[in-house]
Amino acid sequence: MLTGTLGWELTVMRGPDSLWVKVGNPEGPSPESDLAEQLWSLLEQHFVYRLVLDLSEIESLDRKLLGHLLALQRRIRHHVGLMRLCGLSLANQRLVDSYGLNDRFPRYDDLEQAVMGSWPRNPR
């Protein structure tokens, strides 16, 4: 687990050609740091531009955090990568929908679904 220097708690796992990051609620007041910058730095350190972002521990998204995620998504797309979100609460899903960002953020229930994307699972 990594903890961002200015408050974000990040649990990072490396997958094949991607990073899986679980974002924890920051300790104390809203962190001063830009979450997008911290995540971008991680992507560059690992030389990957595919990100699955687990937001299940984020109680409440706000406009500022959504702006950070949009900025990060633009940078990732510029490098021909992709970003997927998983674990959004119903309230956070509604907030994303209210800003008309449904098509910008592919959303999945959990990490496994986000990693698999829209591919059907093969029975074993």
Image (tube, grey):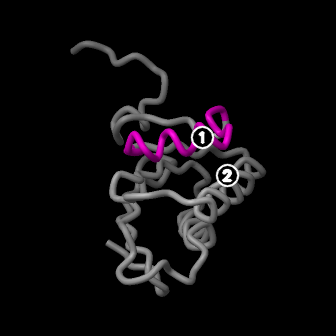
The circle drawn on residue 62 is none
Percent position of residue 67, x then y: 67, 59
Could you tell me the amino acid type at mark 1? Phe
Q: Is residue 14 left or right of residue 122?
A: right
Percent position of residue 114, x then y: 43, 36
Residue for badge 1:
105
Residue with the most extreme bottom position: 5
Residue for badge 2:
73
Q: Is residue 55 left or right of residue 45?
A: left
Residue with the most extreme left position: 124
Identify the residue at horizontal 48%, vertical 78% (top origin): 30
- Disc nearest the viewer among 2 and 1: 1
Could you say whether the residue bearing mark 2 is in a helix, strand or loop? helix
Give, as a single range, the part of the protein colored magenta: 87-103
Q: Is residue 100 magenta?
A: yes
Mark 2, Cα crowd under 10 Å, few <14 / some 14-19 / many 20+, is many
Residue with the most extreme top position: 123
Which quadrant, please, contains the N terminus? bottom left
Q: Is residue 115 above or below residue 3?
A: above
Percent position of residue 106, x then y: 56, 35
Which image quadrant is residue 86 in?
Answer: top left
Identify the residue at horizontal 49%, vertical 36% (top origin): 107
Which quadrant, please, contains the C terminus? top left
Q: Is residue 15 magenta?
A: no
Q: Is residue 78 above or below residue 45?
A: above
